[in-house]
Amino acid sequence: MGSIRNRLAAVCAGLLLAAGTAEAGVKLTLAETIPDLGDATYSAKPGEVKVTLPNGVLEFTWTEMPSTFDETGFKITLSVSARMEGDAANAGDKRPVHVTFFGPVDTDPSPAWAEIMIGPGVATAASEEIIVKPEAGLEDGQTIDIRVGTDLGPTVIYRYTVSTDG
């Protein structure tokens, strides 16, 4: 559980996004996609993380990341759903779970997430469309990581290479 807590702390820190969008002439090209290695409790692959709980399954999904984008950015839809069984669907504390999006980008809305509450008598699915633009100050040849995943820790890293006209 310690590594999940550490990842959660990293997720929270990653949500502090920089202000200002990139200048004209910036292009980001996807170099590689790196899913977290799965274990008995979760699996991660591009576009999806599944977390298995003792009493249900949480699914975090998102639309395909672009192979390239520029200063005009792109849209992504983040979705989260829960299938809880037994007592988890009918009793206990309500708690939020999120699918999050973070990296050296500006997002609208910010923070970039879709949230549901799990517990008795609450919705079990939600989605949010996010507009994503590269932040100002990216340099030619720079490599940036954009992470998409859960507030529980598992993510997929999308590694982009920056190129500029100037």
Image (tube, grey):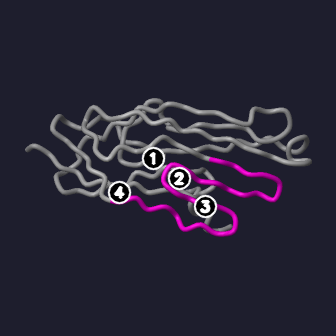
Label 4: how many Cα within 10 Å (few below 14, some 14–19, many 20+): some
Residue 83 horizontal/vertical position (percent): 77, 45
Label 2: how many Cα within 10 Å (few below 14, some 14–19, many 20+): many
Range covered by the magenta-colored residues: 32-59
Mark 4, mark 3: which one is toward the viewer? 3
Identify the amino acid type marked 3: Ser
Identify the amino acid type marked 2: Val
Q: Residue at x 46, y 33 (%)?
A: 130
User: Which label was assigned to residue 159?
Assistant: 4
- Could you say whether the residue bearing mark 1 is in a helix, strand or loop? strand
User: Which label was assigned to residue 102?
Assistant: 1
User: Upstream in the sequence, badge 4 or badge 3?
Assistant: 3
Q: Which residue is mark 2?
A: 11
Q: Which residue is mark 3?
A: 43
Q: Residue at x 60, y 50 (%)?
A: 151
Q: Please check the rendered image and state whether residue 145 is part of the magenta-colored stretch, yes or no.
A: no
User: Upstream in the sequence, badge 1 or badge 3?
Assistant: 3
User: Upstream in the sequence, badge 4 or badge 2?
Assistant: 2
The Cα–Cα distance between marks 1 and 4, rounded to whole angstroms, is 12 Å
